Image (cartoon, rainbow, N blue to C red):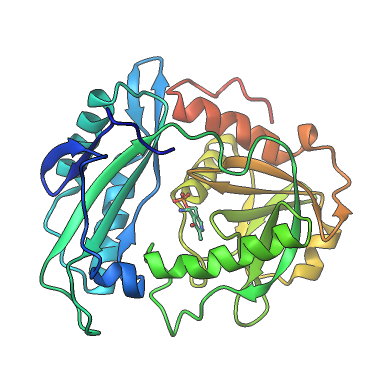
Amino acid sequence: MYYTNDTTLFLNGKFVKAADAKTDLFSQTLHYGYGVFEGIRAYQTVNGVKVFKSHEHYERLLRSASLMGIPLHYTAEELTQATYEVLARNNQSNAYIRPLVFCSPNMSLTSPNEVSLMIATWEWGKYLGDQLLNVCISSFQRPNPKSFKIEAKACGHYVNSILATTEAKQRGFDEGLLLDIEGFVAEGPGANFFYEKDGVLYTPPKGNILPGITRQTVLEICAELDLKVVEKLFKPEELFEADSAFFCGTAAEVIGIDSIERQKFNKPWKESIGATIQEAYRCLVLDKSYSYVIV
Ligand code: PMP
């Protein structure tokens, strides 16, 4: 359950009970997937409840809406304030936050004049769990960036993600890794991907991926810790020569990968660069120094 009778959410400028909140069955978002959303986390830090990179997430929401031609009249600051208020009203500190922009009733294929915005929060464990993952190469490609605004976090893009994760689970894997339309590795259904080879991290460049805020955080951690990271296109075959790999995303945080298509990485996760990043990320979201993290 994502809410109880007591849960409050933010809907169009008001704080209302989730159980009483309603939407219209003729919403364009429900029929066509034409909406945008975010996934954010709040943490109980040493300095109180902190929404991690709230500004960056809400700026991405505004950009997603603008890329999609969905009018949205809030500032990132207003949305951040509303988020802290929802968390306080729900008495939540470690929570997942889901802002969703959805469109009014409109059965035609034109962009709307009016939209709704809700911000819901709930307690949610790490999205991909905390065990190392067995990953397959998905038979689904990420959407063609010439068909979609791939940099937008748009509802409809997640049909592709659901297909990929469902296929992975049906094949007995924990998660899938999707390629782009040229056959280069792109990302997971809900997380970005890094691999390690000879002490260097590699990750796909922007263009065919959702530019993750966690991915950006990993790049910042690498700069801080003097770890070499290269953004480049690579084929899945390169992964079979890699030393280790991980997914990263707001919901999943940083999670190590044990094997790809049943081929295990030879470096123990605990000794990998990913494990160092995982520890540093944990410190960062909790507002703690990670300077002690040994590289
Ligand atoms: N790629 C996809 C397809 C995603 O859904 C997500 C999760 N939002 C990510 C990457 C990671 O993005 P972020 O770090 O901003 O959560």
Residue closest to the eye, 78 or 98: 98
Looking at the image, residue 143 lies above or below residue 272: below
Q: Quarter of the image for the N terminus: give it.
A: top left
Farthest top residue in view: 46
Q: Which residue is drawn at 15% across and 67% down?
A: 71
Q: Residue at x 41, y 70 (%)?
A: 156
Q: Residue at x 71, y 61 (%)?
A: 168
Q: Relative to 270, is 292 on the left or the right? A: left
Residue 249, x across and y down, in percent: 52, 47
Tell me the quarter of the picture where residue 10 sits.
top left
Residue closest to the eye, 11 or 294: 11
Looking at the image, residue 251 lies above or below residue 62: above
Tell me the quarter of the picture where residue 80 sits.
top left
Q: Relative to 267, is 285 on the left or the right? A: left
Q: Quarter of the image for the C terminus: give it.
A: top right
| Picture mark count | 0
Looking at the image, residue 45 lies above or below residue 24: above
Tell me the quarter of the picture where residue 234 sits.
bottom right
Residue 130, x across and y down, in percent: 66, 35
Q: Relative to 224, is 69 on the left or the right? A: left
Residue closest to the eye, 229 or 281: 281
Residue 270, x across and y down, in percent: 77, 32
Residue closest to the eye, 90 or 195: 90
Q: Which residue is drawn at 76% across and 39% down?
A: 272
Looking at the image, residue 215 lies above or below residue 93: below
Residue 226, x across and y down, in percent: 60, 39
